[in-house]
Structure formats: C-alpha cells, structure tokens
Image (cartoon, rainbow, N blue to C red):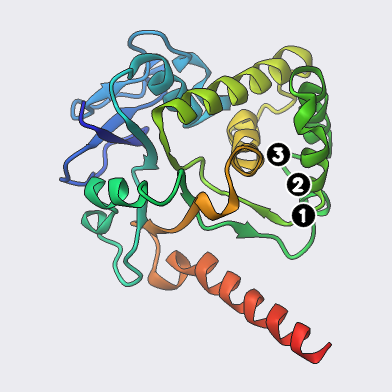
C-alpha cells in the first residue's frame, strides 16, 4: 500500500487510472461478480460481500475499513467516476493524482464531491428509495445510537444538499470513525426495519442511505473551511452531464447573490 490509496470500486471490467496509489476493488465477489484484472476482491478477509445487492459500493468500503490498515489517506472512487480538477476531459487519466490529494490535505481534512442540490428540501424530494419511511427508520437508528446527531439530521432533511456517489477521501483515523458510524446505523436499520424492496434498483437501499448520510457525518465532524468539495469526472457521460452539478450550483449561487442585492 502507498501513503495514499484511492480504491476504484467496480463490479465489472473497466479501464482504471494508470496512476500511483490507485487500486481496483471488485465488489459483489461473493455473489459471482468476477474478472481477472482486479487488484482486490471484497470477499477476501473480513467482509460483507454477500450484501452487495443492497449495500452496493459500501461492501467495498467495509472491506477497505477492515482490511487496509496501512494507508494514511483512503479514497473511494468508482470505475466511471473520479475526483478531478479538470473540467474538460472524460479520460480516467485526468483523475486527481495522489500527489495533489496529499497536497490538499495540508489545508483540508476531507475531500467529497460537490454537493448535489435539490430544488426542494430533501424531505419533500424523497419519492423512491430512500423514501420517507426509510428515512424515518434512519432517524430511529440515530436516536438509538447517536442522539447527538438527531437535531442535525432533522435540519439535514429540511435542507437541500447532500454529497452524492459515496465518494470521499479521508485521513485514516477519520475514515475509521466514519465507517464505524455509518455501518452501525445501516446495521441497526437492517435489523429493525429490513429492506422492503425486491426489485434490483430500489433494493440498493443501504447504498442509497449511506449516500445521503455522508453529508451529515462530514458536516458534524469537520469544520466547514476544512471540507474540500471537488468536481467529479464522469467517464461514461458527456461534458455537459459531467459538469451538471458544477453548472447548477453556480447558477443557484448567482441567483442567491442577486436576490440579496435586490433586498
């Protein structure tokens, strides 16, 4: 392992960056996902690989948490999504280098995707997994396990921002704390609430829930000035789609400033 390891979570064969510190991690291995080129598999060592259909990339996150004890900085990317500072390329080689990542950590404590912004509140925007009942199950878990997060959780639901894709880069100690927190909550929801979905898309419930909850953990534990939001490079989408969150957030910021000037 290098000082920084960025794991590329994948369930099928795909081109990955030929860059120092990037390693491919095949998820769902216990369910038959396989190809010969992966650096690591999520069914080796301590794992929850068999839960991949409902936990998605989080079975990879769990594997990293339990099996990588050497990396100083740990990152999660996907076979088709990477952190980048390049706005005009979809090449995997334009992903953020580990050298740049380590330089960023001289100023920041965490790297996350640029926040996705709903037009309405998160609470009013929930209509598929996760839906309102799912988020109530999360609230019950937080109340039972981490009541100090409860008020912030309610504020989060009445806000309109979250960090998408379950992507992050964290220092080792912070990554351990985040994983303990998120997997305790997911385990509680799974035991007490279960998974009411049976179709392939909606049954990815625990992946969807963790995607919403990353924002809560980061903003509870990190100073705002120490959180670095970065653009995501989409290798399978066009440039306009790849810059969707950047453009939409920029337009909303301009509108907000104009409203303040009018007032």
Residue at 29 percent of width and 45 percent of height: 102
Q: Which mark is residue 1?
A: none
Q: Which mark is residue 129?
A: 3
Q: Earlier in the sequence, mark 2 or mark 3?
A: 3
Tag 3: Cα neighbours inside 10 Å, few (<14), some, or many (≥20)?
many
Name the element at disc 1: loop
Q: Are marks 3 and 1 in contact (CB under 8 Å)?
A: no
Check the image and name the residue furthest to the top: 45
Residue 207 visible in this rendered orientation of the protein: yes
The residue that disc 2 covers is 156
Q: Earlier in the sequence, mark 3 or mark 1?
A: 3
Whether 29 is drawn above or below 166: the answer is above
* Relative depth, front residue between 198 and 63: 63
Whether 142 is drawn above or below 218: the answer is above
Quadrant in which the N terminus is drawn = top left
Query: Where residue 210 sits: x, y (%)?
Result: 61, 34
Residue at 47 percent of width and 67 percent of height: 241
The residue that disc 1 covers is 159
Residue at 70 percent of width and 39 percent of height: 129
Query: Where residue 222 sits: x, y (%)?
Result: 57, 42
Query: Where residue 90 sits: x, y (%)?
Result: 30, 63
Residue 198 lies left or right of residue 193; in this view the side is left
* Relative depth, front residue between 145 and 80: 145
Q: Marks 1/2: CA distance?
A: 5 Å
């Amino acid at each position: 392992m290098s000082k920084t390891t960025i794991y590329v979570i994948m369930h099928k064969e795909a081109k990955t960056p030929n860059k120092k510190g990037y390693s491919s991690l095949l998820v769902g291995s216990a369910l038959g996902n396989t190809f010969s080129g992966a650096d690591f598999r999520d069914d080796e060592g301590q794992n929850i690989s068999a839960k991949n259909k409902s936990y998605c990339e989080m079975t990879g996150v769990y594997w990293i948490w339990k099996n990588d004890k050497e990396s100083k900085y740990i990152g999660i990317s996907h076979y088709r999504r990477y952190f980048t500072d390049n706005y005009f390329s979809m090449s995997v080689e334009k992903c953020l280098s580990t050298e740049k990542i380590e330089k960023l950590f001289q100023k920041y404590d965490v790297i996350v995707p640029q926040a996705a912004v709903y037009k309405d509140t998160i609470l009013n925007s929930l209509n598929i997994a996760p839906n309102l009942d799912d988020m109530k199950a999360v609230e019950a878990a937080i109340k039972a396990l981490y009541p100090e997060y409860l008020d912030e959780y309610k504020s989060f639901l009445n806000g309109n921002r979250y960090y998408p894709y379950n992507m992050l880069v964290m220092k080792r100690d912070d990554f351990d704390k985040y994983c303990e927190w998120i997997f305790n909550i997911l385990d509680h929801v799974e035991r007490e609430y279960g998974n009411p979905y049976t179709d392939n898309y909606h049954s990815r419930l625990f992946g969807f829930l963790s995607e919403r909850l990353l924002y809560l953990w980061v903003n509870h534990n990190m100073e705002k000035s120490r959180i670095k939001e970065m653009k995501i490079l989409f290798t399978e989408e066009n440039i306009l789609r790849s810059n969707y969150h950047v453009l939409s957030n920029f337009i909303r910021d301009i509108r907000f400033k104009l409203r303040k000037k009018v007032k």
